[in-house]
């Protein structure tokens, strides 16, 4: 992703996400919660004037709640709101971390 305001230009990485659906699979609507963990690389750490990010690799933790509408056996749409924390777990001197809240919408494919 791109940095829109502040130090650095980019963040790139991934998360392993575990999701729990509250409604049986055969219904059109289901709600869910999910948690995830992973890592990312960045160029924010190069700016020594900031204290948020202290190294090129950072950990990423997330939690979200959402709702999904399944319009057929394979395809659906989802809308979720979540929290993400990015930090280096004190492996570098600078580690205030980045916290964000956001909304995500997407197209889903079940297999």
Image (tube, rainbow, N blue to C red):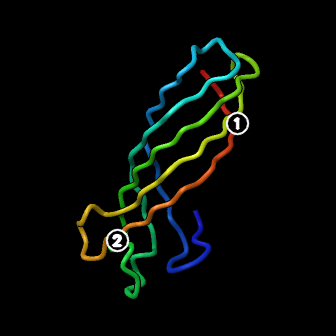
- Look at 68% across and 41% down and name the residue there: 106
At which x and y percent is residue 32? Answer: 54, 30
At which x and y percent is residue 84? Answer: 46, 54
Q: Specify the quadrant of the image occupied by residue 74.
A: top right
- Look at 58% across and 62% down and name the residue there: 1
- Mark 1–mark 2 CB contact (< 8 Å): no
Q: Tell me the crowding category of disc 1: few under 14, some 14 to 19, or many 20 or more residues within 10 angstroms, Cα based.
A: few
Name above or below for residue 80 compared with residue 10.
above
Write down the residue under mark 1.
107
What label does residue 96 carry, if any? 2
Nearest the viewer among 55 and 24 is 24
Relative side of 81 to 94, left or right: right
Relative side of 66 to 54, left or right: right
**Mark toward the viewer: 1 or 2:** 2
At which x and y percent is residue 42? Answer: 45, 68
Farthest top residue? 26
């Amino acid at each position: 992703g791109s940095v829109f305001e502040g130090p650095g230009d980019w963040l790139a990485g991934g998360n392993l996400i575990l999701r729990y659906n509250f409604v049986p699979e055969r219904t059109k609507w289901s709600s869910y919660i999910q948690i995830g963990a992973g890592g990312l690389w960045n160029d924010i750490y190069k700016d020594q004037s900031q204290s948020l990010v202290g190294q090129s690799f950072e950990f990423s933790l997330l939690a979200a709640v959402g709702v999904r509408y399944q319009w057929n056996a394979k395809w659906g749409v989802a809308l979720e709101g979540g929290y993400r924390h990015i930090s280096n777990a004190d492996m570098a001197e600078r580690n205030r971390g980045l916290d964000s809240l956001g909304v995500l919408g997407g197209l889903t494919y079940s297999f």
